[in-house]
Image: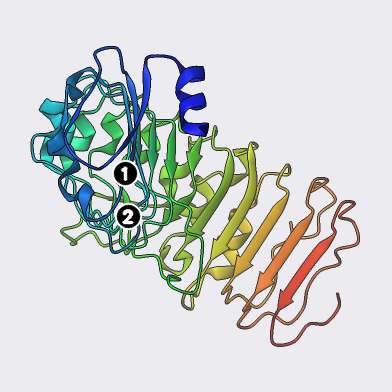
Amino acid sequence: MMQDLALHVSGEDCRCYMTEGPYNLPEKVRYLTVVSSKPASQDMFKVISGAERLHTLIVVGGSEDFVLKIPNDIGKRFIRLRTLDLSNFCVSELPKSIGKLKHLRCLQLQSTKIRRLPESICDLYNLQTLGLRNCYDLEELPHKIKDLHKLRHIDLVMTCNSYHNVCSLRCMPKDIGLLTDLQTLSRFVISQSNALSVHTHRGGIAELANLNNLHGELIISNLHLIEAVQDAALANLASKRFLQKLELSWSNSSKEAEQILEHLKPPTTIKELIISGYTGMACPSWIGSAEYTNLVTLCLYNFKSCSVLPPLGLLPLLENLHLKVPLVSNL
């Protein structure tokens, strides 16, 4: 009854299909939700005819061990597709023909097993949203992602749970900083910088310099790999005034940790700040500054060498203070 009501309200252009056999898509349908049932969905794409008229395809009912076969010619079958959602299935790769979906604006691959995206993704010049939340196996983003000029959201949030707690992402693509209209880039992973390295497609923390429209949260990890203090300054974090949450993370020791953190001053509008793995002897001058009038939560985790914290009484809205440090004095 509820399904019939939903169809009545949505009109003739929306349909919900249960994977039970061949399905001839009505001519007026533009938005299709497929409710999968294992193993009927293994060849789901083969049994749907008339798919070339679809604008939205959402597949639900998946799980981590539910392998969904993506046809090699998906770019030809769904030529008008604007939204494709394959979240929560055991999808480890996409065919190169995905790049032929020239109208695609939203690609959701949340909680899949995807390791790498084909470079043809960068041919989707209308793409605005790339959903990679909880893609723990993802190792890197496409090298030419800078070509996606309309891209606004890259969701790389990793929600730790009992099954997954390690993010495989090891670098950020060079020139990602050219996407100055990005509003979401929830994770930035710093990689080893070496002039003799073959990994010339990797970008450093300075890529963040002009990404001043970022909203929501941003995690910057592997800060111990920053080799030049001036690179931290070039990131210009203080200009990211739309950020609500910032996490700065070290995974190893760094001789320049104190100077690097000093230059990674967050925007004064931040509401939540997390610093973990810091190896400096002293905290930066900006921690506890009265400028941070919106800061509600401050987390200082696993400080290796710092035992003295500055006064925090000037933070007017501070409600939550979480400390995991060897020794704390002068608080």
Taking the image as shown, residue 237 lies to the left or right of residue 18, namely right
On the image, the x and y values in percent for residue 135 come to: 36, 56
Q: Residue at x 37, y 16 (%)?
A: 13
Seen from this angle, which residue lies furthest bottom? 326
Q: Secondary structure at mark 2?
A: loop
Query: Are the residues flagged by discs 2 and 1 in contact, CB closer than 8 Å?
Result: yes
Seen from this angle, which residue lies furthest front? 1
The C terminus, quarter of image: bottom right
- Dot 2: within a 10 Å radius of its alpha carbon, few (fewer than 14), some, or many (20 or more) residues? many
On the image, the x and y values in percent for residue 145 come to: 28, 38
Residue receiving disc 2: 112
Q: Earlier in the sequence, mark 2 or mark 1?
A: 1
Amino acid type at mark 2: Thr
Instruction: Give the CA separation, mark 2 to mark 1.
Output: 8 Å
On the image, the x and y values in percent for residue 37 come to: 30, 51
Q: Nearest the camera: 24 or 319?
A: 24
- Dot 1: within a 10 Å radius of its alpha carbon, few (fewer than 14), some, or many (20 or more) residues? many
Q: Secondary structure at mark 1?
A: loop
Q: Residue at x 32, y 55 (%)?
A: 112
Name above or below for residue 90 compared with residue 76: below
On the image, the x and y values in percent for residue 316 come to: 90, 52
Name above or below for residue 110 compared with residue 6: below
Q: Nearest the camera: 65 or 331?
A: 65
Residue receiving disc 1: 86
Amino acid type at mark 1: Leu
Q: Residue at x 48, y 18 (%)?
A: 8
Q: Residue at x 26, y 62 (%)?
A: 194
The image quadrant that residue 199 belongs to is bottom left
